[in-house]
Amino acid sequence: MRAATLRNSIVVLLMSGLLVSAAQARTLDTAYGDVEVEGTPERVVTLYEGALDASLAAGITPLGAVTTRGGDNVAEYVEAHLGEDRPAIMGVVREINIEAMLAQQPDLILAPAQLPDEQYQLLSRIAPTVVPHSQPLAADNWKLKRVFTVKR
């Protein structure tokens, strides 16, 4: 239930954020506790492929993303959806380039479920950091994609 709440909150945040007043805040239930997100995030950084996919499905091109597994850029299937807006590369999932992230000045970071506490503590000082409860290959991850398809 908590994972579904987080996923639905991310979907709502990404897809309907333009309708939210800048003064309004949302509280998201994440793996590291509640995270408050002020207004509509415009400078999003994604630190795992699922977050990049979800952001693009919601019509948001992140400022930063990690490389695809075994590659040096985002996945080829994503390239077709980027146009001229390309996210800066933030490293790989297991080794995030903090300097590159700081340069983007994000107002929201979408991090992977396996993010260690030490990294979370650092990233959350940069911007609100959302870490899902579920693992990347969890059986219920399909529900996030279903929500995007239905909501869109």
Image: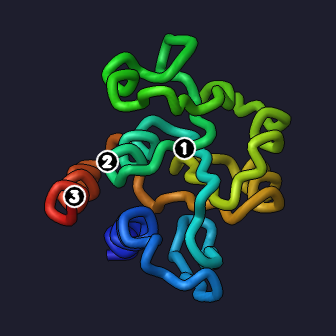
- Residue contact between numbered discs 1 and 3, judged by CB atoms under 8 Å: no
Q: What element carries label 1?
A: loop
In the picture, the disc for residue 86 is: none
Gap between marks 1 and 3 measured at Cα: 22 Å
* Relative vertical location of residue 132 with respect to residue 6 in this rendering, above or below: above
Q: Which residue is drawn at 52% across and 76% down?
A: 28
Residue behind mark 1: 62
Q: What residue type is labelled 2?
A: Ala
Q: Which of marks 2 and 1 is nearer the N terminus?
A: 2
Q: Which amino acid does label 1 sit on?
A: Pro
Gap between marks 2 and 1 measured at Cα: 11 Å
Q: Earlier in the sequence, mark 3 or mark 2?
A: 2
* Relative vertical location of residue 29 with respect to residue 117 in this rendering, above or below: below
* Relative vertical location of residue 26 with respect to residue 85 in this rendering, above or below: below
Residue behind mark 2: 57
Residue behind mark 3: 143
Q: Which residue is drawn at 55% across and 82% down?
A: 26
